[in-house]
Image (cartoon, rainbow, N blue to C red):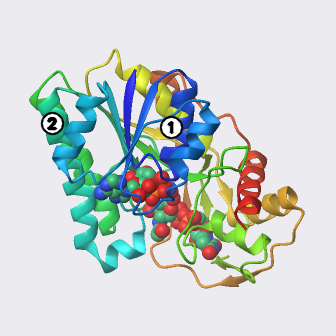
């Protein structure tokens, strides 16, 4: 198939591009490079052993999206493009609504003009809000608790309306849990801007000596070691989940949501120990106050993905840490 990836030069988009290209699809990258490196399209092409066309443009430029869809005879779109930092979304909500909501509307308008009606959307487990039970399945109530989460929820709902308006649409919202890791080569990976908000990139920078120590946000949660538990999923597993979803949509119309997680939770201290083992470096840490808005534990019930897509995560926590470390070492 001919597949356009908006945000294809980003962290998850770049790994998905590689997996789709290696599976034989013709992948086109569409990205404005607002949060990615201009070298990434070339890197993916060299890893895939074939040139992936790259369009440097904004998804809000509807005419340019339409042009790319026509020129490359696109059959399906994977929509990664958007902003994703929770704290920033509280500070500059208009930017988040403009990019995440308007960006999606623009994409849908372009797709409708050329009758491309197959779409995978990058959603997030953040749409579940405070977990009411664990593990979280797709029937769990949704309740976004910050502007970023609300953009994801609004887009999911908007996509539901679009699918109901015309039976030709095939739309899947993929709710990612905590993507971490990198391609095993360490050539592509997550490139955080400034001080990382998320645990894994922060740990990697402590291991490499870029930062002095990790702050563990709370050790008085009702968990085995008192620290927060999350469902970390290897980005290559996540990428393969997209390939399975693209395949699924070829024979399924309508709108649906699927969790992409492992179903296995790890604590902050589990992550520290695993990273120490993978890197051979000590990770100094201090216990700090809980981070506002954090939940004690959050992990997926991934049964629906297995049932519908025939996909499940296979990579271990060691794989996640080793690949993150490989990318970190290539970076510095
Ligand atoms: P990322 O920032 O690395 O990738 C997003 C890409 O989109 C970047 O390359 C950026 O330059 C591009 N982009 C942003 N706005 C654009 C626009 N208007 N036009 C064209 N390109 C634009 O982020 P990521 O971690 O790869 O996340 C991809 C998607 O997955 C996002 O929608 C994010 O909200 C979602 N998601 C990410 C996580 C996570 O932890 N990384 C978790 C859940 C959901
Ligand atoms: C964050 C986002 C969420 C997004 C998810 C997936 C916030 C508030 N939420 O969630 O919207 O869907 O990433 O990428 O940003 N921790 C520390 N020290 C640190 C950093 C984190 O102890 O320096 C702890 C946290 O308290 C938490 C765990 O590590 O228990 C994971 O944190 P993080 O990587 O930020 O992910 P989430 O909080 O799950």
Quarter of the image where ligand 1 sits: bottom left
Which is more N-terminal, label 1 or label 2?
Answer: 1
The quadrant of the rendering that contains the C terminus is bottom right
Q: Is residue 303 above or below residue 294?
A: above
Front one among 152 and 187: 187
Tag 2 residue: 162
Residue at the spot 51% in from the left edge and 29% down from the top edge: 20
Callout 1 environment at 10 Å: few (<14), some (14 to 19), or many (20+)?
Answer: many
The total number of labels drawn is: 2
Decide if residue 111 is on the left or right side of residue 203.
left
220 relative to 69 in the view: left or right: right
Q: Note whether 154 is above or below 281 in the view shown.
A: above
Q: Which residue is under mark 1?
A: 17
Where does the image place residue 27, in percent across and percent down from the top left?
A: 44, 32
Q: In this view, does 278 lie above or below 268?
A: above
Viewer-nearest residue: 264 or 89: 89
Residue drawn 44% across the image and 41% down it: 137
Helix, strand or loop for disc 1: helix
Say if residue 86 shows up in the picture. yes
Residue 66 vs residue 223: left or right? left
Element on which disc 2 rests: helix
Locate the N terminus by quadrant: top left
- Residue found farthest to the left: 165
Task: Please give left or right for residue 45 compared with residue 200 in the image.
Answer: left
Q: In which quarter of the image is residue 276?
A: bottom right
Q: Where is residue 70 in the image (x, y as percent from the top left)?
A: 23, 29
Q: Which residue is drawn at 43% across and 20% down?
A: 247
Q: Position of residue 312 (x, y in %)?
A: 59, 31
Spatial CA span between label 2 and label 1? 26 Å
């Amino acid at each position: 198939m001919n597949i356009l990836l908006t945000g294809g030069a980003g962290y998850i988009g770049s790994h998905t591009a590689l997996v789709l290209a290696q599976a034989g699809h013709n992948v086109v990258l569409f990205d404005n490079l607002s949060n990615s490196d201009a070298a990434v399209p070339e890197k993916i092409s060299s890893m895939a052993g074939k040139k992936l066309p790259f369009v440097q443009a904004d998804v809000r430029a509807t005419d340019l999206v339409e042009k790319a869809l026509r020129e490359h005879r696109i059959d399906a779109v994977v929509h990664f493009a958007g902003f994703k930092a929770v704290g920033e979304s509280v500070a500059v909500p208009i930017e988040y609504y403009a990019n995440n909501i308007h960006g999606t509307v623009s994409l849908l308008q372009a797709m409708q003009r050329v009758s491309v009606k197959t779409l995978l959307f990058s959603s997030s487990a953040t749409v579940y809000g405070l977990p009411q039970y664990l593990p979280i399945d797709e029937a769990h109530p949704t309740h976004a608790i910050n502007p970023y989460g609300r953009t994801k929820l609004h887009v999911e709902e908007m996509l539901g309306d679009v699918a109901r308006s015309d039976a030709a649409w095939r739309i899947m919202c993929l709710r990612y849990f905590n993507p971490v890791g990198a391609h095993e080569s360490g050539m592509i990976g997550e490139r955080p801007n400034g001080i990382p908000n998320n645990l894994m990139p922060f740990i990697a920078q402590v291991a490499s000596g870029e930062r002095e120590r990790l702050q563990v946000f709370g050790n008085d949660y009702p968990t085995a070691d008192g620290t927060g538990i999350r469902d970390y999923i290897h980005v290559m597993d996540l990428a393969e989940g997209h390939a399975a979803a693209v395949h699924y949509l070829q024979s399924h119309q309508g709108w649906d949501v699927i969790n992409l997680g492992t179903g296995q939770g790890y604590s902050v201290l589990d992550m520290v120990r695993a990273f120490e083992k993978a890197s051979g470096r000590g990770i100094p840490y201090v216990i700090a106050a809980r981070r506002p808005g954090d939940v004690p534990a959050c992990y997926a019930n991934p049964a629906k993905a297995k049932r519908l897509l025939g996909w499940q995560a296979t990579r271990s926590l060691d794989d996640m840490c080793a690949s993150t470390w490989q990318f970190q070492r290539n970076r510095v």
